[in-house]
Image: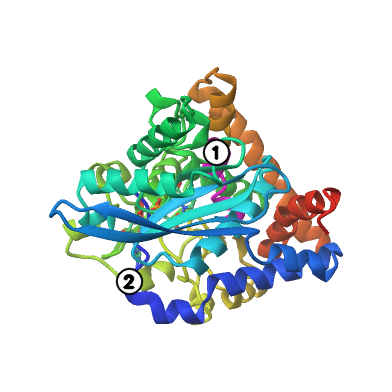
Amino acid sequence: MAADLGADNQAFDEKHDVLKSTQTVIHKALEKLGYPEEVYELLKEPIRMLTVKIPVRMDDGSVKIFTGYRAQHNDAVGPTKGGIRFHPNVSEKEVKALSIWMTLKCGIVNLPYGGGKGGIICDPREMSFRELEALSRGYVRAISQIVGPTKDIPAPDVFTNSQIMAWMMDEYSRIDEFNSPGFITGKPLVLGGSHGRETATAKGVTICIREAAKKRGINLEGARVVVQGFGNAGSFLSKFMHDAGAKVIGISDAYGALYDPNGLDIDYLLDRRDSFGTVTKLFDNTISNKELLELDCDILVPAAIENQITEENAHNIRAQIVVEAANGPTTLEATQILTDRGILLVPDVLASAGGVTVSYFEWVQNNQGYYWTEEEIDEKLEKVIVQSFENVYNTAETRRVDMRLAAYMVGVRKSAEASRFRGWI
Ligand code: NAD
């Protein structure tokens, strides 16, 4: 399950509007690449945005009407691709921004996709299994005309999982009158899911950390790592770092953080965390998330929620490398401060692209009907992420821009180019 975005954070998020900041960087990236203004006009918003109402009969007999969205940012390169989020804070603006980020991720790792994203305003933690199934199936029926294996391929995101993907695939297959595993990724293995999908994001982040450490001459053996968030991304990442010989000295969840300068027992913590990534409640001597981010360390990985490194704390970050496993953890002001301070920032659209990469492998396997081993998946993922990291890093160096702008330049180019070849602009 994915991150709790914090219902009380709305006022703060108004200030750090993710759609606006994404548009700002897209604009700069297109300018740097020499594209005219109309390309920005096309790419600043999704090309298609569907709002749907989904009636669900609840367990108490009443009917509740849920609101859902599906955004397709740009389909010039190929079908759009991106997860479906179930969360009370889902909004049209957030879904739009997330669909643009997906275009950037797909462009960076060079997949034949544009970006898409979906969301339903709901709180799955308060719904029964039956209600969740009805909502998932109702959403697919409502968006079925604009999605499909060659149009737009959903996947899991915050508070959605392989079971929800399975219901959605089944519903789409009924509508399509074909078994359509290629309609959605992140499925259970027996329904055409891929080996390595569950750990793909953390593996991608791990590869980025390794490559960034090489650039800064940091030996991972014994390097001090701090990870904010101990859910799907943060917990697997902590394990991979621990196995690589690094010392994970701090981890956190929504309730607090744990710190041990000698290195935490990650296997024990993994064993004790619950399905929402909570583990710190078991301990008395915790520190705050704010303190965690400012710990003296070599590598800091925000792997929880948005807007964690801001102009208020960016000056206090002591890591040499910050790798964004979470989507949008650093504001634009903070990006500038970290870059000016010589800290190497690996941006979210590059660092967390391992998930969509293995989702692509899942879709390819579904289309060809032939399935790869975990080793084959790992080998392919490794190649893609190393190449993508180099590409972004070299762009930052040669064009003298920060890593976020470089990632946006690499990420947006394919959609801009494809739109031009198609004669749209
Ligand atoms: P998750 O729900 O599995 O875990 C989230 C973790 O963050 C939990 O430990 C939770 O306690 C913690 N958290 C929640 N609110 C917090 C707060 N206010 N302060 C500190 N910690 C808090 O989520 P996940 O799937 O690991 O995703 C984490 C981030 O990574 C999100 O930004 C998500 O969009 C991004 N991401 C995840 C994937 C993936 O495949 N899981 C892919 C790409 C990006």
At label 2, counting other C-alpha atoms closer than 10 Å, the crowd grade (few under 14, some 14-19, many 20 or more) is few
Q: Position of 229 compared to 388: left or right? A: left
Q: Is residue 324 magenta?
A: no
Quadrant in which the C terminus is drawn: bottom right
Name the residue carrying label 2. Answer: 7
Whole-percent x, y for residue 362 in the image: 53, 31
Q: Is residue 357 magenta?
A: yes
Report the Cα–Cα distance between label 1 and label 2: 32 Å
The quarter holding residue 158 reads bottom left
Disc 1 marks a residue whose amino acid type is: Gly
Whole-percent x, y for residue 316 in the image: 49, 76
Name the residue carrying label 1. Answer: 148
Could you tell me if residue 237 is visible in this image? Answer: no
Numbered disc 1: secondary structure: loop
Whole-percent x, y for residue 323 in the image: 54, 57
Segment colored magenta: 348-359
Q: Position of 156 compared to 337: left or right? A: left
Q: Which residue lies at the image location 22% right of the left edge and 44% below the top edge?
A: 130
Q: Which residue lies at the image location 75% right of the left edge and 70% below the top edge?
A: 28
Q: Position of 260 compared to 412: left or right? A: left
Q: Position of 61 compared to 240: left or right? A: left
Ligand 1's quadrant: bottom left
Whole-percent x, y for residue 412 in the image: 72, 56
